[in-house]
Image: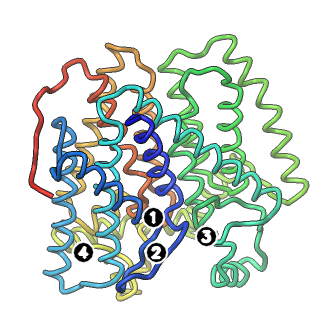
Amino acid sequence: MKSNAGKVQLWILFLSIFMPNLFNIRLIGMNLTFGRTVLIVLLLLCLYREEGKIVFRNRLETVCMVFFCCWVLYGILLMALNGSVHKEGLKEITNIFMGAMTVYCTLRLIGESGEMLGYSIEILRKLVAVCILVGIFETISGEHLRSSCFNDPAYIYALTQRYGSVNMYQATGFQYGTNDFCSFLVFFFPVFLLKRKGKVFDYLMIGAIAVICAVNSSTLCLLTLILGTSYFFLKEKQIKPQNVFKILAILPVLYVAWKWLQYSYGNSFSLMADLKNHLDNYLARGGSSYSRFWTYIKSLALAADTYFVGLGPANFTAYVAANPAKEMLLNPHNLWLEIFTEYGIMILVFYVVFLSTLFCKAGDIYKKSGVQRVFLIRVMLIDYIIVGIVPSTFISYLYQWILLALGIAIVKIHGIKKEKKLVTYGEA
């Protein structure tokens, strides 16, 4: 009975993270979204089951929660010292705190059971498949959800002014923009790599992600998808005749789908042509590639100006708006630079060290156990490093914290040496 309740709660948790704005209620001066409501309710349920105590069940989990606390408190301190307490900064700090809640609730629901861990991955697989199907529907119909940028009059007007027309046959899924959606899909695509019956469906889903990235002209996401898939098959030694045959059988289907979309809706895309276009624009000191590169260089100088302690939460945009002579993009377009410029070198280094620890521990466990879902975390971490630089801002996406929760759970459940001590911290 408890297991079934846990499964239902995991479904609701992941659904709220994938579609956080399913509803939005204004209550006591703040927006109470579907995502926030679910996290608050589930956290209270977790505290109730632990008799009002916050419980950490292994060292990695303890370190992760302490890190989140330090991150939130440091952000508040920076706002206080800089005198820059504003709505966007408070929203960003709230989202980081919700990230801690996401990790904690996911770990409590998974518990010590390998079955619940596997069920979590299966839920993600089904939800991502639904998102892919929604994306394919958008590329065919040109219809979009209310959360999409294609239903934002300001966005449509800006594109029309710049390009003269708007290609509505792109995909945003439950996200706002095309790059946001592609980075989301590529971030989660490894859930389709695990061994199971009916792999043809999984290969089709990965192929559909490639088609969506091509339709959206999201070059970096497509390259990341290729890199992640290649890394998995090479390290897993899955290059067997039957697997090669399945992949080769699906490639013509993907090619026909791409050509049909190109012919019917004008979604033309060529990876090599797009890469050449980016290179030509960069050499001509124009286009998005050059703008990003220039912003990255200026961001490093900006971090040095703050003595590497950080501007404060969500202050990157405010700084650029106040200093137009810097000629930077309004957003850093890079998760790592966003953390570096807004929260300083200490937070960035600690986070990178923590992710590296997960990567190394997962590798050690995989060598000894051969459990494939342990390897899944390594592929997701590689994807995370790259797709974090695709959207204009990545730091507030709640779904990224699922990676931390799964990584900690996998190390805890499949680790050779399990810690037996139960650490209790504080009262509810």
Please name the amino acid that badge 2 sits on.
Leu
x and y percentages locating residue 55 in the rendered image: 17, 44
x and y percentages locating residue 96 in the rendered image: 31, 62
Quadrant in the picture for residue 143: bottom right
Nearer mark to the viewer, of 2 and 3: 3
Q: CA distance from mark 2 to mark 3?
A: 24 Å
At label 2, counting other C-alpha atoms closer than 10 Å, the crowd grade (few under 14, some 14-19, many 20 or more) is many
Q: Earlier in the sequence, mark 2 or mark 4?
A: 4
Residue 120 vs 213, above or below: the answer is: above
Q: CA distance from mark 2 to mark 4?
A: 16 Å
Considering every residue shown, the one lying at the far front of the view is: 1
Q: Total marks drawn?
A: 4
Q: Are marks 2 and 4 in contact (CB under 8 Å)?
A: no
Q: Which mark is residue 311?
A: 4
Residue 192 vs 44, above or below: the answer is: above
SS for tag 1? loop
SS for tag 2? loop
- State the residue position of label 2: 329
Q: CA distance from mark 1 to mark 2?
A: 8 Å
x and y percentages locating residue 413 in the rendered image: 30, 26
SS for tag 3? loop
Please, which colouring scheme is shown?
A: rainbow
Q: Earlier in the sequence, mark 2 or mark 3?
A: 3
Q: Which mark is residue 147?
A: 3
Please name the amino acid that badge 3 sits on.
Ser
Nearer mark to the viewer, of 1 and 3: 3
At label 3, counting other C-alpha atoms closer than 10 Å, the crowd grade (few under 14, some 14-19, many 20 or more) is some
Q: Are marks 2 and 3 in contact (CB under 8 Å)?
A: no
At label 1, counting other C-alpha atoms closer than 10 Å, the crowd grade (few under 14, some 14-19, many 20 or more) is many
x and y percentages locating residue 28 in the rendered image: 35, 85
